[in-house]
Every structure is written in structure tokens, then in C-alpha cells.
Amino acid sequence: MKFRNINIISIVAACIILIIGLAAALMAFNNPAKAFNENNSRNNTILASLSEFHTLGNFVDGHDGLACRECHKYSDGSIRQQIQALAKNALFDAGYQVDFAFRKVSSSECLKCHERNNDRHPIYRFNEPRFIEVVKILPANKCLGCHSEHNAKTVNLDSLGFCASCHSELFLKNDPLDISHAEIIKTNDWNSCLGCHDFHGNHKFKSPSLYDESVSVQAIKDYFDGGKSPYGTSKISEGLKK
Ligand code: HEC
Ligand code: HEC
Ligand code: HEC
Ligand code: HEC
Ligand code: HEC
């Protein structure tokens, strides 16, 4: 009986020592305060070494020369979360540590440079309950719902006609178009919308009233794929350069 108790105590003690040891090792290996530092070379080393393992594509136009850390922030989760992440990566994703040291890139990183009060489709709007079903199909409440990085694409959507998710009931009282919005929608010509409207409303671009004057579908596709903007180069607000 006595013997057994000692056994349990020593097992518990051994466990505690092991956990403390692990935590200490982890903290030494990856001290958040130390690691998250503007000039931190360790973060950059990890990113640089990762870039050798992953074939990173070109940046989005305008992002050339941005520091990796502008988007990849050190993950400051608790030690427990980090151990979990470490274990998860070790088990399922050997050799792949991004989750451990870095958190997923989120809209807040993008907004630090791209916050603009002229956005006609600001992401926060789409957290409203009436968009719950829509955002399941089209995550319009996140920048990365439509954009991506490292694949040179400006917009990462296959379809141009995604306006249909929200504008199927559109009706204009005094429609200025030669072919009215109502007719366009009746014929499901959703690919035409981007021919006359950019999405964010950030280009200094006047929507034409004549259907034949709209931007071609091919020009919009090329723009999505990293080509130049068919709405011109003049913008109301530009991303901050850092
Ligand atoms: C403008 C923002 C931005 C910049 C700058 C940036 N990245 Fe990324 N990176 C992303 C996004 C978005 C992803 C997609 C995965 C995610 O959401 O975390 C990604 C993914 C990655 C991945 C794959 C990891 C994963 O979770 O899929 C690696 C590796 C990576 N980036 C390395 C780099 C390196 C190295 C640099 C600097 C040369 C860099 N990144 C600069 C936004 C950026
Ligand atoms: C450190 C600042 C910075 C961060 C962070 C940043 N951007 Fe940018 N981005 C810029 C700048 C500067 C430009 C070029 C000027 C412009 O087009 O507004 C640009 C351009 C772009 C363009 C292409 C513009 C074009 O016409 O080809 C897209 C799309 C874009 N950013 C999306 C994003 C997304 C999505 C994120 C988050 C993953 C992000 N950016 C994070 C600064 C930033
Ligand atoms: C529902 C899809 C969608 C979401 C969500 C989205 N975008 Fe876009 N974005 C587009 C499309 C489509 C274009 C191309 C048409 C245009 O230029 O407006 C674009 C173009 C851009 C451009 C280049 C033109 C410009 O406005 O300067 C930037 C920069 C950009 N997006 C940044 C962002 C950022 C930052 C977020 C998150 C705050 C975001 N986008 C969210 C679809 C989206
Ligand atoms: C996720 C939902 C959603 C998607 C997708 C969407 N919109 Fe909108 N759009 C809205 C909402 C909400 C408004 C604001 C309407 C209001 O305030 O009554 C709006 C407003 C607009 C406006 C008027 C802006 C102004 O200044 O009054 C235009 C033009 C527009 N959208 C075009 C488009 C086009 C073109 C597409 C596709 C490329 C698109 N929208 C995709 C939800 C969406
Ligand atoms: C031939 C060009 C053209 C096409 C195609 C077109 N629009 Fe328009 N749209 C206009 C013009 C011009 C206006 C008038 C207001 C303006 O100048 O922005 C307008 C107005 C709007 C408005 C109201 C904006 C406001 O200020 O109240 C919305 C929303 C809109 N369009 C969405 C769409 C959607 C969604 C599609 C695709 C089904 C579409 N448009 C297709 C040219 C076009």
C-alpha cells in the first residue's frame, strides 16, 4: 500500500518535471517576447527556410518588396496551444511549422495597409446576420475569401458572376442603361456586372451606360490573373507602403 503511494507520487513528480522541462525548452526555443521583434532574424530565417521547401509564387502586384512579417505575424498563443500545435504538426504535417510559429494571415493584416472608407463592399458588413448563408458560399467577410498571396493572382475567384449571391433582387428606379439592369439579371448575365463596376469602387472609373462600352470579360479575367487593371491606374486610395 505504502509502496504504491510512493510509486504514484514519483510518477506524478516525474510528469511535472517533464512538463516544466518541455515548457522551458519551448520557451527558450521560442520566447514570444524575444521572437516577436521588428528585426527578428529567427522569424525571417524560418520564413526564408520555408520558402525553400514551398514553391512560393510571385506576389500580388504592388506587394513586391513587402517584408514577410507584414503579413506573417508571430503566433502568440499560450504555451498549451503551442504544444498542441507542435504535436499536431509533428503528427500530421512533419516538417511544416508555420502554424507553430506563425498564425494564419487574417484580414486585419490586410486592413493595416488597405483600410479605406470608400469601400462599397467593406468586409465587416457581411458579418450581418442576413449574409450568413451567403458567406458560407462566398466568404465576403474576409479578404482571403477572394484574394490570396504567392500565386500572383490579383483576385482568386473562378467566377466573375459572384455578384449574383447578393444582387439578384436589384432594381433601379431610373435605370440609365440601354439594356436595363432588370433585363441583364433576367437573362442571368452576371458576368457583365464587373464590366461596368469594379468591386470595391476604388478606381476612378465612370460606369458606362452603354452595354457595348463595358470592359470585356477577357480583360477582367486577365486582371484577376495578375494583369493590369481594366479600370485604369488611377485610384481613390492606395495601399500604404511600409
Ligand atoms: C501580403 C501578405 C503576405 C506577404 C507580404 C507574405 N505572405 Fe506568405 N502568405 C500569405 C498568405 C495570405 C498565405 C496563405 C496562408 C495563410 O493564410 O496563412 C501565405 C502563405 C505562406 C506560406 C505557406 C504556409 C501556409 O500556411 O500555407 C509560406 C511558407 C509563406 N507564406 C512564406 C512567406 C515568405 C517567406 C514571405 C516573404 C518573402 C511571405 N510569405 C510574405 C501572405 C503573405
Ligand atoms: C504593408 C502594407 C500592405 C499589406 C500588409 C497588404 N498590402 Fe496589398 N498592397 C499594398 C500596396 C502598397 C499595394 C500597391 C498599391 C495599390 O494597389 O493600392 C497593394 C496592392 C494590393 C492588391 C493589388 C492591386 C492591383 O491593382 O493589382 C491587392 C489585391 C492587395 N494589395 C490585397 C491585399 C491583401 C488581400 C492583403 C492581406 C493578405 C494585403 N493586400 C496586405 C500594401 C499592403
Ligand atoms: C467578395 C470578394 C472580395 C473580397 C471579400 C475582397 N475583395 Fe478585393 N477585390 C475583389 C475583386 C473582384 C477585385 C477586382 C475588382 C476591383 O478592382 O475592384 C478586387 C480588387 C482589390 C484590390 C485592387 C483594386 C483596389 O481597390 O485598389 C485591392 C487592393 C483589394 N481588392 C483589397 C482587398 C482587401 C484588403 C480586402 C479585405 C479588406 C478585400 N479586397 C476583400 C474581390 C474581393
Ligand atoms: C456579399 C454580398 C455582395 C456581393 C457578393 C456583391 N455585393 Fe454589391 N453590394 C452589396 C451591399 C450590401 C451593397 C450596399 C447596398 C445598400 O447599401 O443598400 C452593395 C452595393 C453595391 C453597389 C452600389 C454602391 C453604392 O455606391 O451605392 C454596386 C454598384 C454594387 N454593389 C455592385 C456589385 C457588383 C458589380 C458585384 C459583383 C462583382 C457585387 N456588387 C457583389 C452586397 C454585395
Ligand atoms: C453597361 C454598364 C453596366 C452594367 C453591365 C451593369 N451596370 Fe450597374 N450601373 C451602371 C450605371 C451607369 C449605373 C448608374 C449609377 C452609376 O453611375 O454608378 C449603375 C448602377 C448600379 C447600382 C446602383 C448604384 C447606386 O448608386 O445606387 C448597382 C447596385 C448596380 N449598378 C449593380 C450592378 C450589377 C449587380 C450588375 C450586373 C447584374 C450591373 N450593375 C451591371 C452600369 C452598369
Image (cartoon, rainbow, N blue to C red):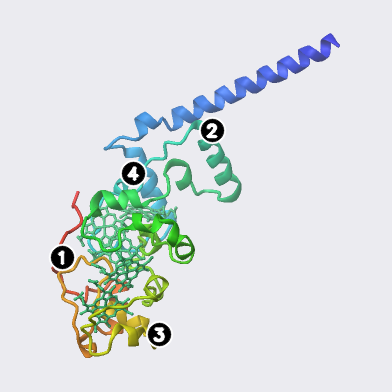
Quarter of the view holding residue 172? bottom left
State the separation of the CA atoms marked 1 and 4.
Answer: 32 Å
Residue furthest toward the right? 1
Q: Secondary structure at mark 2?
A: helix
- Identified at 55% across, 46% down, the residue is 89
Mark sitting earlier along the chain (4/2): 4
Q: Looking at numbered disc 2 in the image, what kind of residue is underneath it?
A: Arg
Residue furthest toward the front? 173
State the separation of the CA atoms marked 4 and 2.
Answer: 24 Å
The residue carrying pointer 1 sits among few (fewer than 14), some (14 to 19) or many (20 or more) residues within 10 Å by Cα, namely few
Residue 214: horizontal and vertical position, in percent?
23, 84
Q: Quadrant of the N terminus?
A: top right
> Is 150 drawn above or below residue 240 in the view shown?
below
Q: Which residue is mark 1?
A: 235
Badge nearest the viewer, 1 or 4: 1
Q: Quadrant of ligand 3?
A: bottom left
Mark sitting earlier along the chain (1/2): 2
Badge nearest the viewer, 1 or 3: 3
Q: Which residue is mark 3?
A: 188
- Identified at 83% across, 9% down, the residue is 2
- Identified at 38% across, 51% down, the residue is 106
Q: Which residue is mark 4?
A: 44
Q: Which mark is residue 174?
A: none
Mark sitting earlier along the chain (4/3): 4
Tell me whether the residue at label 4 lies in contact with that at label 2, contact meaning CB atoms closer than 8 angstroms. no
Mark sitting earlier along the chain (1/3): 3
Q: Which residue is mark 2?
A: 80
Q: Looking at numbered disc 1 in the image, what kind of residue is underneath it?
A: Lys
Q: Secondary structure at mark 3?
A: loop
State the separation of the CA atoms marked 1 and 2.
Answer: 45 Å
Mark sitting earlier along the chain (3/2): 2
